[in-house]
Every structure is written in C-alpha cells, then in structure tokens.
Amino acid sequence: MDKIYDKPELIFADLPVGKTFRPLDYPVSEELVQQFMETVGDRHPLYWDEGSAQRTHLRSPIAPPGLAAIYARLSYLQDHTMPSGGVLAKQEFDFHKAVYIGDTLKVKAKVMESYLDEKGRKRVTFLIEAENQKSQPISTVRLYAIWPK
Amino acid sequence: MLKSVKAGDPLSSIEKQIDQDMIMRWAKLSGDFNRLHVDPEYARQTSFKGTIAHGPMSLAFLNELMMQCFEAGWAVGGKLLDVRFVAPIRPGDRIRIGGKIKEVQKKEEKYSVECDLSIEKQNGEKVVMGRAIGLLPGEEK
C-alpha cells in the first residue's frame, strides 16, 4: 500500500449529502489475509484451514470480516487523504455474506449526512456498501465522523 | 464458539499488547499513514502528546472476538452496532477485548445473541464500546 501524502485533503466542503465516490476495487488475496492475520494477531482457523471451513456452511476458508474496517475507509479516500484531527465517532457493520480468498470486492461510498451540529462540529455520515464479483451484497457499513476542516 | 449462553454470561476475552510496530504494520495494511499514527515526533506536538493506534484497528479486534464467539454465524449475519471510540489507544497499552451476553432470541432455526462489547486498558479505562448481534445454530444450544 503506497503512502498517500501526495493526494489532496478531503475537506468538509467536498462532502455534500448525496456525494458518491468512484467504486473501490478491493482484491482479497491470500497475501492480504496473511498480512491481516499477522498484523492483528487473529489467526482464526476459518481463515486458513480447509478442514475447519468444510465443517461449516462456508465450505472453504474466508477472509477476516475485520477487513471491512479497512476497505470501508479506503472507499472514500482513494483520491484524497484525511485531514489531520478528524475523529471517527461511531461505526456499524452488517455482514451479509462471507468474503472468500480470491474475491474482488467493489465498494461504494455515499455521503448520507453532512451538517454542523449544535457545537458547530462538522458531522459526516457515510453509507458504504460492498459487493463481490458476482454482485452479491457482502457488507453494509455506516461510518459517523467528525470532520476537522 | 459459544455453546450455552444466557443473558449476563461473560464472553471469553482477548488481550493485546499495543506497540508502535503494530501501529506501523496496520498503517501499511490499511494505507493510513496519518502522521498522528506513524510519526512520533509530530504526534508529540499535538494534543494527543504521542502517537495513537488507528480506530479501525479496534474494529478488527472486536471482529476477532466475535469470530471466536460465533464463527460462521458472525461472518454471515453478524452485526456490529453503535461502536464508539471513547479514548485513544497508545503504544505501550495492554488492552482487553471482551463483553457479555445481553439477550438471546430464538429466530427460526437459529439463536440471535446480542452482546455488549468493550475494549479496556490495563487500568480499567474503557476506550471502545459497542454492541453486536451474532447467530448461533439452533442445535448448538
């Protein structure tokens, strides 16, 4: 993953209600899953053990659901960087279908709310929806942020 | 996986030791190289007085706990709700990811289990709070 310092900042004025972002293509490779497991320390057998996966309705190893925390954020920051001082206030996830190693997700983000709260803070709510290469819904993420500028 | 559950039962917990190396690895994995996370000298000059872990890393920890509890019933049908980031996690912190069962409901052939979740520092300070709903197969009860 390249550093993103050279991208322009995504500022509040660029986040009106209804704004959409170009869809993120997110390939889920075995290498990515391995890197995730090593970084987080989460080595659940369903991510790597064929036998464990076959004993469930999943049938083969899956990607960690926690990857959604990464692709959700990337979906609105492909062409921008986050200004310093932002706060991730709240986040919610619905997992509809498992992600399998080798899948390529298409992740779409949309601004659902953009307003100044009673304290004058810049509030932005994103709805982020991911689907797999068969157009099957994978996850829905709601991300509530306080924007710095 | 959870076998027998009732409201009030504690979940098994996970402990993590956070260090700057782990934060750097998350930056590489996620592409989030915000200086508040990766540049100790810069971060010392901010109101945080030092680097802090990325918020989404905490979401990965909560997902790890839920996968331990619900396995396939988390990956398909799991919901992480109202997760709030109350305080920063810093290098050197030892954190505990845990929770307890709030409510169990039978839904068709499955059990829907609602849990309160939290991440606490070694001093008991809660840094992340939220709820989750996972599914257990009926025959497991």
Image (cartoon, coloured by chain):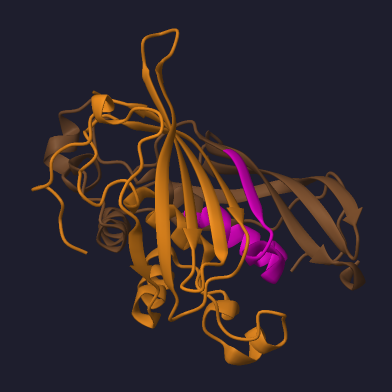
Chain colours: A orange, B brown
Percent coordinates x, y for residue A42 in the rendering: 50, 68
Whether the magenta-drawn stretch holds residue B44 is answered as: no
> For the image shown, how many numbered marks are present on the structure?
0
**What's the residue at 57%, 87% (across, down)?**
A49
Percent coordinates x, y for residue A146 in the rendering: 37, 26
**What's the residue at 37%, 78% (across, down)?**
A29
Q: Quadrant of the N terminus of chain B?
A: bottom right
Along the line of sight, the residue nearer the viewer: A34 or B89: A34
Percent coordinates x, y for residue B119 in the rendering: 55, 44
Picture quadrant where residue A39 is located: bottom left
Q: Main secondary structure of the magenta part?
A: helix
A147 sits left or right of A113 in the view = left
Q: Quadrant of the C terminus of chain B?
A: bottom right
Percent coordinates x, y for residue A85 in the rendering: 26, 29
Along the line of sight, the residue nearer the viewer: A38 or B106: B106
Along the line of sight, the residue nearer the viewer: A146 or A131: A131
Q: Is residue B81 above or below residue A95?
A: above
Q: Is residue B52 above or below residue A53?
A: above
Along the line of sight, the residue nearer the viewer: A95 or B19: A95
Q: Is residue A37 above or below residue A3?
A: below
Whether the magenta-drawn stretch holds residue B69 is answered as: yes
**What's the residue at 59%, 70% (across, down)?**
A98
Q: Furthest-left residue in view?
A: A6
Q: Furthest-bottom residue in view?
A: A51
Q: Is residue A62 above or below residue A74?
A: below
B7 sits left or right of A57 in the view = right
**What's the residue at 59%, 86% (across, down)?**
A60
Query: Magenta residues, as a range?
Result: B60-82
B104 sits left or right of A92 in the view = right
